[in-house]
Amino acid sequence: MLSDAQQLERRGAIVRILREGLVRKQEDLVRLLKKAGHEVTQSSISRDLRDLGVLKASGRYVLPADEVTRANGDFGALAQFVRGLRLAGPSLTVLRTTIGAAQSVAVAIDKAEWPEVAGTLSGDDTIFIATANSRAQEALVGRLRALFRV
């Protein structure tokens, strides 16, 4: 079992590799990490990619927007993945994304800590965003439309 320091080092290596080039398959990432001296398996890479918020788009792995940037409300890097918005009652908003992008967009929304959002639940291409009431939903929808142009 890896120590926390080893896991952080491996995740740092994953981020560097993804920033440097196009990785299309987890097997490629495993090979590159092993070449760099890291002990990895496909399942450990899957967990790391999920925990890092990495998504697969256009056939390659894409890093999420920088944590600090997301918390400050810059969703520009994620806007390309958002496809639509729909209301489902007075306190549930459904945001549709490209396949594989919902978790990254939901994490960004959660980290932004918008007062109108009670919580999010994401699947592969769908995010449910709960608000306390219709007034909070109106504020959320205005914000989402402005950010993602949906």
Image (spheres, rainbow, N blue to C red):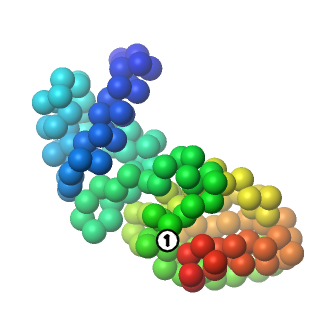
Q: Does residue 58 appear in the picture of this structure?
A: yes
Residue at (63% x, 67% y) in the render: 128
Quarter of the image for residue 122 reads bottom right
Q: Which residue is mark 1?
A: 79
Q: Residue at x 21, y 43 (%)?
A: 29
The one nearer the camera, 102 or 146, is: 146
Q: Where is residue 86? Give x, y as percent.
A: 63, 82
Q: Quadrant of the C terminus?
A: bottom right
Give residue 110's position: percent from left, percent from top. 65, 54
Q: In the rendered view, tell whether residue 10 sits above or below residue 86.
A: above
Place of residue 118 in the rendered image (x, y in percent of width and height, measured from the top left):
77, 58
Where is residue 95 drawn, in percent x and y?
58, 74
Where does the N terminus fall, quadrant-wise? Answer: top left
Question: Which of the pair 119/16 is nearer the observer?
Answer: 16
Q: Residue at left 30%, top 55%?
A: 61
| Amino acid, disc 1 | Ala
Q: Is residue 63 above or below residue 35?
A: below
Label 1: state its secondary structure: helix
Residue 110 visible? The answer is no
Q: Residues within 10 Å of mark 1 (few under 14, many from 20)?
A: some
* Residue at the image position 84 percent from the left and 76 percent from the top: 134
Residue 12: name its quadrant.
Answer: top left
Q: How many marks?
A: 1
Residue 20 vertical position relative to residue 4 in the rendered view, above or below: below
